[in-house]
Image: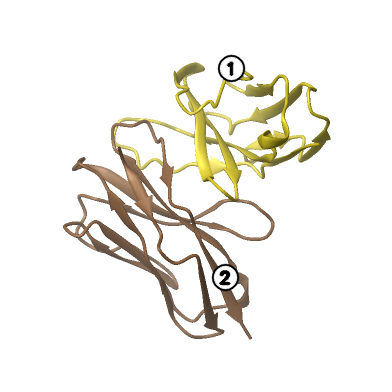
């Protein structure tokens, strides 16, 4: 079975440019999460969706960040305009949430973003 | 707020020996799940082991086992017969049962297995 698929795997861009990261969750999963990993702050939850609806976006750092999930098989995380401090690895993860389940997240391989 | 603390930034162990990674957490919840994830140099996050707070028995997965002390809010990971492939960053994570699988991660411990 295919796991969580993220693209691009690496992105290098210049400050001020728009960046779009993409994620395809595991088929059948109904929850999707975007995490950011940096040396200084570790793994931070940015936003998560349940049944395509954003449930908690309290981790989104500022208005430059936006995330969408137009359907059950696709999500995007957009940064506009990008800044050097946005440089990080961005992970997408999915899970199947049912009352009483154990909460295992399945992660993609991450998108490494470098903003110059 | 829930927090997860991993007090060991780096650990080293000789191949075939046993190592224990520490994790403590802070929560007022009574029903929750705890996890250890492994992140090798490939960057992929891989679930190692999970523990449900209402189960008193410690979880085990082959060479990996946990020591879950609910009253002390402690959740350590023991790796027996360490292998070179165990070299990775290890993250402890926590989620209350009603939080929709929203995991809170610790800062991680880098484990190096030496030959």
For disc 2, the chain is: B
**Foreground of the two, B14 or A32:** B14
Residue drawn at the location 77% of the way across and 21% of the way down = A18
Q: Colour of chain B?
A: brown
Query: Which quarter shows the N terminus of chain B?
Result: top left
Q: Name the foreground residue: A16 vs B113.
A: A16
Q: Which residue is mark 2?
A: B86
Residue positioned 48% across, 41% down in the render: A105
Residue B104 as seen in the image, left or right of residue A9? left
In-front residue for pair B53/B20: B20
* CA distance separating discs 1 and 2: 39 Å
Q: Which residue is mark 1?
A: A63
| The hue in which chain A appears in the rendered picture of the protein | yellow
Residue B19 visible to an observer of this rendering: yes
Task: Please state the horizontal and vertical placement of residue B14, each as a whole percent of the image.
Answer: 55, 85
Point out residue A78 in the picture as x, y percentages from the top left corner: 68, 22
């Amino acid at each position: 079975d295919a796991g969580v698929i993220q693209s691009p795997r690496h992105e290098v861009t210049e400050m001020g440019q728009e960046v779009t990261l993409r994620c395809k969750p595991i088929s059948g999963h109904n929850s999707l999460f975007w995490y950011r990993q940096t040396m200084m702050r570790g793994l931070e939850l940015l936003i998560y969706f349940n049944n395509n609806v954003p449930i908690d976006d309290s981790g989104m750092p500022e208005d430059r960040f936006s995330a969408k999930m137009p359907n059950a098989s696709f999500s995007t995380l957009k940064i506009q305009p990008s800044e050097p401090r946005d440089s990080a690895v961005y992970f997408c993860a999915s899970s199947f949430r049912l009352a009483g389940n154990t909460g295992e997240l399945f992660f993609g391989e991450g998108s490494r973003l470098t903003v110059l | 707020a829930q927090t997860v603390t991993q007090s060991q930034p780096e650990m080293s162990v000789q191949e075939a020996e046993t190592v224990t990674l520490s994790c403590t957490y802070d929560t007022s919840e009574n029903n929750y799940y705890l996890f250890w994830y492994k992140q090798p140099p490939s960057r992929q996050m891989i679930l190692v082991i999970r523990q449900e707070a209402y189960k008193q028995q410690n979880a085990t997965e082959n060479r990996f086992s946990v020591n879950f002390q609910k009253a002390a809010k402690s959740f350590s990971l023991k790796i027996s017969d360490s292998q070179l492939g165990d070299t990775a960053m290890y993250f402890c994570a926590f989620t209350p049962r009603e939080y929709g699988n929203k995991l809170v991660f610790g800062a991680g411990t880098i484990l190096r297995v030496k030959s």
